[in-house]
């Protein structure tokens, strides 16, 4: 049905835009004018259909929005579960790693703290029994001041100065072997094992049975060791260890029994 001739009136009536008099007159016409009544019925049906369609589309949009939100929620939940599982796996890995590290630290601590037989050191200084030389007495200071000065410097650890002072001492006042022996001691303590051998060997060979020779022989063996001449060092110290009259017999035996010069 063509609603165009009646559309404005029908719309004003439906929207309540008519005055009370116009509304009464329009309702009277609806009762008397069949064409207007049909147009009104068609208009009502049309507006109802439009409202239904609009409502249905709105519902569809709402349902679609709800589905979208549910999908987003599901995705978010899945993502959260994935992150939780990844954190759990990561925590398990770190926990395992921490346990391994803790175990390794415990093993290392046990290994370091366990009682073990100490390996003998091969450093000659660990076995060396030094000879401080004669004591610097008041009498020595008066009778042999240069020798007293050299001995004081030697005993204080000033080996280059001691060697210099010893070079000014006359052999006629002290004795050649004594000067050779003291020079050998000072060179040995200064770390010049090769040079010390020259002086200590002369004292050891000149009078092999004298007390000074027995002392020099021990220090000669240590001078060989310091110079890394291990075979003569072992041979010399074995001779000292076998000499019951040597004041260094115990020290030499300690080196020989430790085996620090064997198989190097």
Image (spheres, rainbow, N blue to C red):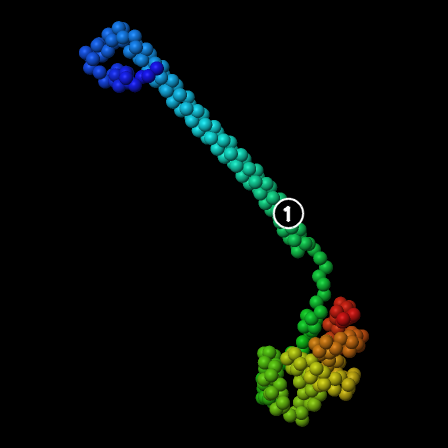
Residue 240 image-quadrant placement: bottom right
**Residue annotated with mark 1:** 100
Indicate left or right for 16 with 219 as reference: left
Q: Nearer the viewer, residue 170 or 140?
A: 170
Q: Quadrant of residue 95?
A: top right
Q: Is residue 25 above or below residue 202?
A: above
Side of 40 relative to 88 (left or right): left
Instruction: State the quadrant of the C terminus.
Output: bottom right
What residue sits 63% from the left and 89% below the top? 167
Residue 210 location, x and y as percent?
76, 84
The location of residue 154, given as percent across then percent down, is 61, 81
Is 33 located above or below residue 254 in the figure?
above
Q: Nearer the viewer, residue 102 or 133?
A: 102
Q: Nearer the viewer, residue 96 or 37?
A: 37
> Which residue of the protein is positioned furthest toward the top in this rendering?
32
> x and y percent of residue 96 in the render?
62, 44
Residue in view at x 70 percent, y 73 percent: 124
- Residue at 64% x, 53% y is 109
Picture coordinates of residue 4, whole percent (x, y): 30, 19
Disc 1 is placed on an element classified as: helix
Please tell me which residue lies in front, 194 or 85.
85
Q: Residue at x 71, y 88 (%)?
A: 177
């Amino acid at each position: 049905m063509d609603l165009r001739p009646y559309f404005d009136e029908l719309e004003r009536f439906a929207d309540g835009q008519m005055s009370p008099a116009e509304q009464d007159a329009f309702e009277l016409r609806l009762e008397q004018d069949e064409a207007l009544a049909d147009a009104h019925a068609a208009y009502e049906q049309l507006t109802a259909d439009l409202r239904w369609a609009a409502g249905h589309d709105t519902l569809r949009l709402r349902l679609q929005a709800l589905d979208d939100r549910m999908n987003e929620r599901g995705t978010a939940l899945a993502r959260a579960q994935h992150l939780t599982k990844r954190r759990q796996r990561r925590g398990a890995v770190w926990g395992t790693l921490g346990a391994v590290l803790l175990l390794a630290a415990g093993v290392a601590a046990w290994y370091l703290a366990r009682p073990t037989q100490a390996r003998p050191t091969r450093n000659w200084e660990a076995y060396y029994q030094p000879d401080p030389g004669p004591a610097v007495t008041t009498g020595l200071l008066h009778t042999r001041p240069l020798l007293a000065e050299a001995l004081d410097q030697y005993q204080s650890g000033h080996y280059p100065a001691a060697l210099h002072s010893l070079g000014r001492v006359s052999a006629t006042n002290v004795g050649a072997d004594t000067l050779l022996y003291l020079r050998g001691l000072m060179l040995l303590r200064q770390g010049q094992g090769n040079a010390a051998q020259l002086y200590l060997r002369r004292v050891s060979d000149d009078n092999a049975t004298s007390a000074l020779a027995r002392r020099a022989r021990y220090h000669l063996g240590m001078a060989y060791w310091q110079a890394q001449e291990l075979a003569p060092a072992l041979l010399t110290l074995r001779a000292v260890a076998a000499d019951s009259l040597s004041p260094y017999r115990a020290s030499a035996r300690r080196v020989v029994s430790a085996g620090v010069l064997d198989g190097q």
